[in-house]
Image (cartoon, rainbow, N blue to C red):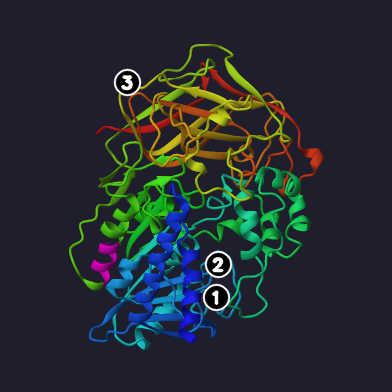
Amino acid sequence: MKMNKLYIIILVISTVFFVDCSNKNEKTQNADVSKRANENSLFISENYTKKEYQITMRDGIKLFTAVYSPKDQSKKYPILYKRTPYSCSPYGEDIFPSVLGSSIKLAKDLYIFVYQDVRGKFMSEGDFIDMRPFKSEDGDSTGIDESTDAWDSIDWLIKNIQNNNGKVGMWGNSYPGYYAAAACINAHPALIAVTPQCPVSDWYWDDFHHNGAFLPAHYLGFGQSFGQERTELTKVWPEHLFEFSSKDGYKFYMENAQPLSKVKTNLYQDKIAFWDSIVAHPNYDYFWQQMSLIPHLKNINPAVLTVGGWFDAEDLYGPLAVYEFIEKNTNNNNNKIVMGPWRHGGFGRGDGSILGNVFFGNNPAPSVFYRDSIEFPFISYHLKGEGTLTLPEAYMFETGNNKWRTFDHWPPENTQSTALFFNSNGYLSSTETALQDSYNEFISDPNRPVPYTEDISPKMTKTYMTDDQRFASKRPDVLVYQTEILEEDITVAGKISVKLHVSTNQSAADWIVKFIDVYPDDFQNFEHNAKYIVMGGYQQMVRSEVFRGRYRNSFENPEAFTPNKVTLVEFDLQDVLHTFKAGHRIMIQVQSTWFPLVDLNPQKYVDNIYKAKKEDFVKAKHRVYCSVGTASAIEFNVLKN
């Protein structure tokens, strides 16, 4: 009876961990994945023993820690350690998960796997603080932060877990990626290698904030369960505070979270303390600054392999920022980066060959190549001393051409700066227009905002960053600019900069810019495409970003627009490595709403948008200028070879 109960629990966990809906035959795929997960669970239960501990930190708080050790005790093993706020379930020394580490290949190679509930979460004592400020750098020996908790835990593990070889590696995806990166700061000497994967790094730029704008479709559903304060040690997630009354997120958020002042009572029932902090700190003040991981990533000793996805709708900023700051602030660093064609965490599930409607190739499939040829040798070499390691500084997947590229520097140095200027006739050109008083204008109506996707979902979709944008280009409140048909391939590498000369007849505005690859009209469908999908003329979003105009001069000190005054708004889109093929076009779309991905700007300046009232939201006439001397443009670097 005990074993039957065990396998039922394993099967349920397997299904939750491995559901991947990206393939064309979902039922068959899920059945195959569940079968493999069950086989993996059997391997783990037969080859590992499990023990649970409460490890005492320097201030006396105890952290719940599960340790899975190989049954084969004939040799010593490295420790692979993960810290998480999302529960290190399953709890119980006789219950095993379907995966150990980030892949079954690592589990079969045998390591000592360690999972830990972070301070204040689930079965660990103490108080949980989101993105806990760092104190250990201040020289306060009694101060605790996520770096010291990792240090104390590693020290205990090295001294108390039998058959370890004295070497520790850490990994984690998303918030656990943050904890992995945090452990690099004043790292324990036994911490040899770390791979932060899609790490959260600064919550004013990651996840639910982008350039000062709030992302309700991402945060509000997630925040209701994750943000509830725990009253006692627990093995289960709290119950949801609300259910989505409609599967149509556009409808749901318009009714329940517009304006945002409705959220506290309508959705959160006054039970999410962190929501109160978000509302109280709309600007990039000390509250957000002290939470940032980035400024502390200096003089890093462990080898670091940071991993991210080009189409990560949650944490695209994080991996790029973590890599960049370590690179600039650690001499003689062993710091590398990998970016693939993935959604959030996509490298760890499925084969990565498909995202939404777009196919990235399967020879080899991107996620399989990453797990087998990048992650596995990185961990094996540093922790076991096995094999040779020839990883480049940057392993980057080039979308469009759909192949892996290696670079000695990122962004690459062999590039040429290029600008495309907006023309009022809807074209992008390499030269600035000579026209005077030339502009395009549109009416932005907060009662009828531009949707961010055609999909019907109550939450942020995982694939919107590769969505077809034809639905948006047909709207009168979306400006469209595009090149002529390209005569040769153009590979864009690194950051994309936007320079908009704009005006509004009101006093506030958001600006959304989308960088789009327009396929030829005769482009053939991919094999996985549903019958109703037409890839001919597909407008694939390659990169996009929102900028809240009040922050054009300072994220700490917002300011209104002067009505009808031409104003420069500059911001960056995140890095890309994408080839626009000959026969394609480059398109830019500009708009001021993107709902419910981005909250609605009242368009009448208020001190705090989270407290805006319904009557504050007004229609506005926005202009984007294309005149000589005030020509809007997009700038990027083109790879020379």
Mark 3 falls on what kind of element? loop
Check if residue 266 falls in the magenta segment. no
Which label sits in the foreground, 3 or 2? Answer: 3
Give the Cα separation between the discs numbered 1 and 2: 10 Å
User: Outermost residue toward the top?
Assistant: 435
Q: Which residue is denoted by mark 1 in the rendering?
A: 119
Residue 87 locus on image (x, y percent)? 53, 72
| Pointers 1 and 2 in contact (C-beta within 8 Å) | yes
Of residues 205 and 436, the one nearer the viewer is 205
The 10 Å Cα crowd at callout 3, few under 14, some 14 to 19, many 20 or more, is: few
Label 1 amino acid? Arg
Residue lying at 26% horizontally and 32% vertically, measured from the top left:
640
- Which quadrant of the view contains residue 617? top right
- Mark 1 or 3, nearer chain start: 1
Q: Which residue is denoted by mark 3 in the rendering?
A: 487
Label 2 amino acid? Arg
Check if residue 379 falls in the magenta segment. yes
Residue 638 locus on image (x, y percent)? 33, 32
Q: Which mark is residue 457?
A: none
Q: Which residues are magenta?
A: 376-383
